[in-house]
Amino acid sequence: MMASTLITTKIFFLILLVGFTSFDDAQAHPTSYEGSVGIMGRHSPGLNHVQINYSWRYWAASGLHYFKAPEISSESDAAYVSANFLLRRWNTKKLQANLYFAGGPGLSRLQGKSKNSGMGLVQFDIEDRRLYFLAKHQILFNKDDYELQLGTIRFGIAPYVAPAGDIHTWLIAEYSAKNYRHHRGNEDVTTLLRFFYKNMLFEIGQSFKGETKFNYITHI
């Protein structure tokens, strides 16, 4: 329980810190423009998460999520449906900030047998064209306790500002923390290269612990 509290506390204080700073984000958002379908994946040797979101409005979407945790066992997975909401957006001439929430029911086998489960997500990002910051906390839980908590903090910088329609490149530093209820979690730092072109974004990087990570996002 102390580890999960530590993850939440770290993210909380960094969100307070970034409220006084300007950053940029081309990161996955739980909602997008009306009528769009977002397909997103985060892949690493220990944990994979694939999601599909359909945005009914720019502020509301429905989602499907699938988690696979081979670091526990070959059968450790979970699936959820979610309702996703843009809770607040702040716009200025130079930057945009967003606060999102997503949550919903599902089934989980992360503890060895299938259980009714729930998922919750809070995400904050703030962006301009050169820099960005993102803080995200996600929890998978059942009626007894949490099963998995995921904390993510990201800083990014664009080495150049490309015109619309060109390839955009980003350098990313990511801190991540996993805390399972019944399995050893870990904390790690990863450096990634991000390439963004039109409606396609992908990232590839190596963590300080030697894990190769690959992420992708597309909107159709």
Image (cartoon, rainbow, N blue to C red):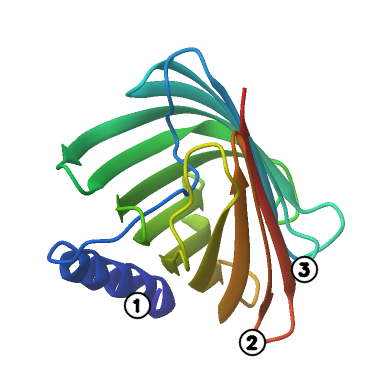
* Figure quadrant of residue 210: bottom right
Q: Secondary structure at mark 2?
A: loop
Kind of residue at badge 1? Leu
Residue 104 is situated, as x and y percent measured from the top left of the image, at: 47, 31
Quadrant of image for the N terminus = bottom left
Q: Secondary structure at mark 1?
A: helix
Residue 46 is labelled as none
178 vs 189: above or below: above
From the viewer's side, name the closer residue of 130 and 30: 130
Residue lying at 37% horizontally and 21% vertically, measured from the top left: 60
In the image, taking residue 148 as reference, residue 3 lies left or right, namely left
Residue lying at 42% horizontally and 30% vertically, measured from the top left: 31
Kind of residue at badge 2? Phe
- Furthest residue toward front: 163
Circle 1 residue: 6
Circle 2 residue: 208
Q: From mark 1 to mark 2, how far is it between C-alphas? A: 21 Å
Circle 3 residue: 71
Whichever of callouts 1 and 2 sits on the residue coming sooner in the sequence is 1
Q: From mark 3 to mark 1, how far is it between C-alphas? A: 22 Å
